[in-house]
């Protein structure tokens, strides 16, 4: 079997690009930091930020303010997959029902801050994400590292699918 390529060795167009969406302080940047083995440091995201050429981090305002709906959809053009994030310890959501229909892409749900909530809070966050059209949904805590392995495994699967699709297009001379 061929040796798996590192991200640096992979062709740019083969890299799976994921984009995080969620309200301010939902835990998007912390999750990006965790996934990139960085120290978890709080920085308010002021504008779209790209980690490692594969993760697009957006400011919470992009979801919260109607004014930013357009930029959010435009930014999503660069992503293969959207990650809707909903904190487990929040009783409200900024995701409207069927929010996924704004994007012609797979939308995965991530419940964040599971360490701050009880089962009821987690179930509620899952419900909000399901209603927003996210599927599948992972329950995580960047502080405790829970649920991240399952989330990464799913991303790995999507990454393989993207490479397979691109290889097919290459064989057909389309890319
Ligand atoms: N307890 C706990 N706190 C968390 C977790 N993830 C993030 N936080 C905290 O939540 C706060 C906000 O996290 P960020 O990752 O900056 O949130 P964000 O979604 O990027 O917010 P914006 O940049 O404003 O859109 C920070 O103080 C984090 O330390 C978690 O899993 N557990
Ligand atoms: Mg942020």
Image (cartoon, rainbow, N blue to C red):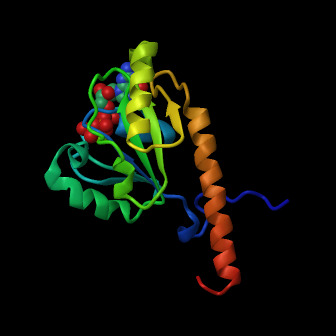
| Above or below, comparing residue 140 to residue 160 in the picture | above
Q: Residue farthest to the bottom?
A: 173
Give the quarter the ligand 2 occupies: top left
| Residue 148, horizontal then vertical, whole percent | 55, 33
8 relative to 134 in the view: left or right: right
Residue 42 visible in this rendered orientation of the protein = no
| Residue 80, horizontal then vertical, whole percent | 48, 60
| Above or below, comparing residue 168 to residue 47 in the picture | below
| Residue 77, horizontal then vertical, whole percent | 38, 65
Residue 94 visible in this rendered orientation of the protein = yes
| Above or below, comparing residue 137 to residue 156 in the picture | above
Please identify the quarter of the rendering in which residue 101 is found: bottom left
| Residue 50, horizontal then vertical, whole percent | 38, 54
Residue drawn at (66%, 57%), measured in percent from left and top?
A: 160
Please identify the quarter of the rendering in which residue 48 is found: bottom left
Residue drawn at (29%, 42%), measured in percent from left and top?
A: 96
How many numbered marks are there?
0
Residue drawn at (32%, 33%), measured in percent from left and top?
A: 26
156 relative to 50 in the view: left or right: right
Q: Residue farthest to the top?
A: 118
Q: Residue farthest to the left?
A: 67
Residue drawn at (58%, 82%), measured in percent from left and top?
A: 175
- Nearer-the-camera pick, 4 or 157: 157
């Amino acid at each position: 079997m061929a040796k798996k390529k590192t991200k640096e060795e992979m062709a740019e167009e083969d890299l799976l690009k994921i984009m995080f969406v969620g309200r301010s302080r939902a835990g998007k940047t912390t999750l990006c930091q965790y996934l990139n083995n960085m120290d978890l440091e709080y920085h308010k995201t002021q504008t779209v930020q790209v980690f490692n050429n594969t993760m697009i981090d957006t400011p919470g305002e992009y979801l919260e303010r109607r004014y930013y709906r357009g930029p959010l959809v435009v930014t999503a053009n660069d992503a293969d997959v959207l990650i809707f994030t909903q904190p487990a310890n929040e009783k409200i959501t900024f995701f409207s029902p069927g929010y996924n229909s704004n994007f012609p892409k797979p939308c995965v749900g991530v419940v964040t801050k599971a360490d701050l909530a009880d089962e009821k809070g987690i179930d509620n966050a899952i419900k909000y994400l399901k209603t927003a059209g996210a599927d599948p949904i992972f329950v995580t805590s960047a502080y405790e590292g829970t649920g991240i392995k399952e989330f990464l495994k799913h991303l790995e699967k999507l990454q393989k699918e993207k490479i397979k699709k691109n290889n097919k297009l290459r064989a057909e001379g389309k890319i």
